[in-house]
Image (cartoon, rainbow, N blue to C red):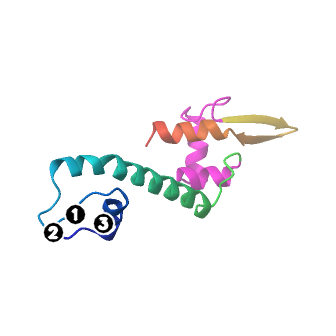
Amino acid sequence: MSYSPDIMKLLEENNIDSSSTGLGALEYLRLLPLLFEQNKELFQRIKHLEQELIPKLDLTKRAGVKKFLNCSDGKISSMMNDGRLKEGVHFIKELKGRKAKITFIESGIRGYKEENS
């Protein structure tokens, strides 16, 4: 029986006989924790690569929130007006003279995306 190079390496490293008749049930059971550990390591590497490759978005600014939620300026405004994005939870509004400065709350925006995806 032919196994992938990764499986062959695991078999050799752990002194598991890979004779031409194939692996027995016990050999397969011995492989499970090794495969699980290898899978966990690969997942961690992928997560690290994603963090390096995906551009960091500033979720306190409207531009970052637009990209993160994949929506337009108008959609964000209507979400703020109709209460889907709540003041104090998803954003803070500061009045400066006649203008309002909106600062988004990163944890609130991430939570909103999780709840609505």
Find out whether residue 94 is within the magenta segment. Answer: no
Give the alpha-carbon distance from disc 1 to disc 3, as whole Å.
8 Å
Quadrant in the rendering for residue 15:
bottom left
Residue annotated with mark 2: 1
Give the alpha-carbon distance from disc 1 to disc 2, as whole Å.
8 Å
Find out whether residue 69 is within the magenta segment. Answer: yes
Nearest to N terminus: mark 1 or mark 2: 2
**Mark 1 vs 2: CB contact within 8 A:** yes
- Amino acid of disc 1: Ser
Q: Position of residue 91 (x, y in %)?
A: 68, 36
Q: Position of residue 42 (x, y in %)?
A: 45, 57
Of residues 14 and 63, the one drawn nearer to the viewer in this rendering: 14
Mark 2: give few (<14), some (14-19) or many (20+) Cα within 10 Å.
few
Front: mark 1 or 2: 1
Front: mark 1 or 3: 1
Quadrant in the rendering for residue 85:
top right
**Mark 1 vs 3: CB contact within 8 A:** yes
Q: What kind of element bears circle 3? A: helix
Residue annotated with mark 1: 18
Residue annotated with mark 3: 8
- Say which quadrant the N terminus sits in: bottom left
- Amino acid of disc 3: Met
Q: Give the extent of the magenta segment.
A: 61-90
- Amino acid of disc 2: Met
